[in-house]
Amino acid sequence: MLAQPMKDESAEIIVNRPEVGLYHLLMLRAPGIAPLVAPGQFVHLRIWPCADALLRRPFSVYRVEGDCLSILYKVVGKGTAALARMPPGEHVAALGPLGHGFSLPCAGGGMPILVAGGYGVAALYLLAERSPVRGILFQGGRRKEDILCEPDFRALGWEVRVATEDGSWGTRGLVTDLLREELRSGGRGAKLYACGPTGMLRAVAQLAEEYGLPAELSLDERMCCGMGVCLTCVVPVRTDTGWEYQRACTEGPVFDARQLLWEVPS
């Protein structure tokens, strides 16, 4: 079930600029969608200039400001390359908000801990902004250029700890190594929220289980329709009677870590 009614509108590009490396910031005026967005939801964009882009592309909503929403994207193929060339004033077809997002931390509850890998951090900003309590963001990437939005989270009052695999920024190693150190030394009672590569999410789920902590994970699955029709993005989840497939675009992309099966049972 979708968390909010969805809209399909022609969204005007207000800003479309490079940030660092292959990462870009896109701001769209989407008055029908922006006010409805909940943390962790996404939009599906049709990129008109790309003849090969028959299907829409899903992008996590990074920020919402009035009737505008922003996304962070990385140029990885023909569709995002075409998007990067579109100037302000042009339009994209935007469908959203889509998906089941994060639940907000409770005031007086456990400390929220956010875990981001690469541009998965974009899915966590609205959660950090709207949370009634501040906590820690653990952010990881292969190199310094993969660490995005760090000043934005600090400006919200969140502590930020960074790990890069090559040691070019923050601590050398994996972000889940930093997370383990925190949980070992004093993270009891925390709640984890994460978005990033599947390997990182699986490690976060294992740590949550090891330390008996609740965790919500935003999965990065390939999607076609974005509305639960095509069944391209199904993932296996536990049920009271065994297991079943659920759709990352509707029942997700955010799931309780305890639900997820990382391998299909034989």
Image (spheres, helix red, strand yellow):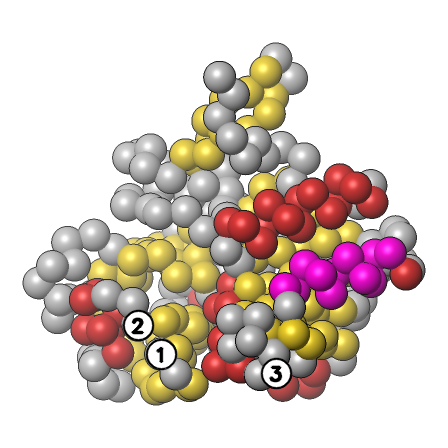
Residue at 45 percent across and 41 percent down: it is 248
Amino acid type at circle 1 is Leu
Q: Nearer the viewer, mark 2 or mark 3?
A: 3
Label 2's element?
loop
Against 85, residue 46 (above or below) is above
Q: Is residue 50 magenta?
A: no
Residue 242 placed where, x, y %?
59, 16
Q: In this view, does 48 lie to the left or right of 194?
A: left
Label 1's element?
loop
Q: Earlier in the sequence, mark 2 or mark 1?
A: 1
Q: Earlier in the sequence, mark 2 or mark 3?
A: 2
Q: Which of marks 3 and 1 is nearer the N terminus?
A: 1
User: Residue 75 has which mark?
Assistant: 2
User: Residue 169 has which mark?
Assistant: 3
Look at mark 1 in the image and give the residue it sits on: 22
Instruction: Give the CA distance from mark 2 to mark 3.
Output: 22 Å
Residues in magenta? 174-184
Amino acid type at circle 2 is Val
Callout 1 crowding tier (Cα within 10 Å): few <14, some 14–19, many ≥20: some
Q: Number of labelled discs?
A: 3
Instruction: Give the CA distance from mark 3 to mark 1.
Output: 18 Å
